[in-house]
Image (cartoon, grey):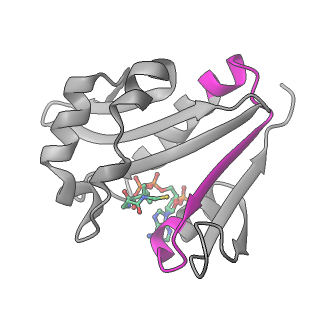
Amino acid sequence: MAVRIDLADVGDLHQVLEDHARYWGERDLRALHLTALVREFGSTSLVARGGDGIRGYLLGFVTPDRTGYVHLIATRDDTRGTGLGRTLYEAFTETARRQGAVRLKAITSVTNEGSIAFHRRLGFDDRLVEDYDGPGRARVVFTRELRAQ
Ligand SMILES: CC(C)(COP(=O)(O)OP(=O)(O)OC[C@H]1O[C@@H](n2cnc3c(N)ncnc32)[C@H](O)[C@@H]1OP(=O)(O)O)[C@@H](O)C(=O)NCCC(=O)NCCS
């Protein structure tokens, strides 16, 4: 079944929030799904649509220091391992480059082994940063330089 990468709108955001567990399992990340991201960074808010609905999404933006920051990426539980996460990253990278990005960045919790393996596979370097999210709240920080094309 074909998948199309589209720009995400607020309706898509509400749809993925309704189906939150399909993307994030037991973890509750609903508070990170800010309408402002889709409204203000619409060109880097992406959704992957198939005939059976939203299969994955990525919310990101390009910072003033030219970092393409991926705030959230998730693929639906029945689509994992099909290359969709990679496709979403490629689409984001293309747009971020056009907006001047020279590197990519993302973070994850230290226990998210799937995310760490995925980002390594996509060529990111990772490092553990103590207190990243406040005292005692370490995070894994992923970075990847974007080579000039
Ligand atoms: C992380 C996530 C987005 C990966 O999406 P995906 O669609 O399964 O990833 P892809 O199929 O595009 O995988 C790309 C590569 O990463 C590898 N990979 C993906 N998930 C992996 C895992 N859990 N363990 C090991 N390797 C993994 C794939 O094998 C693939 O390698 P290849 O291209 O050499 O074959 C998905 O597992 C997910 O939504 N997880 C829950 C939400 C989450 O934790 N998001 C990340 C928060 S920062």
Looking at the rendering, the stretch of residues picked out in magenta corresponds to 94-115
The quarter in which the C terminus is drawn is: top right
Numbered-mark total: 0
Does 5 lie within the magenta span?
no
Q: Which residue is located at x 79 percent, y 38 percent?
A: 146
Judging depth in this view, the residue of 123 and 25 nearest the camera is 25
Residue 103, position in %: x, y? 77, 40
The residue lying toward the viewer, choosing from 139 and 5, is 139
Q: Quadrant of residue 98?
A: top right
- Residue 6: percent from the left, percent from the top? 36, 21
Left or right side of 34 for 124 = right
Residue ID at (76%, 21%): 100
- Residue 64 vs 133, above or below: the answer is above
Which residue appears at 71% of the width and 72% of the height?
129
The residue located at (57%, 69%) in the rendering is 116
Q: Position of residue 138 (x, y in %)?
A: 61, 76
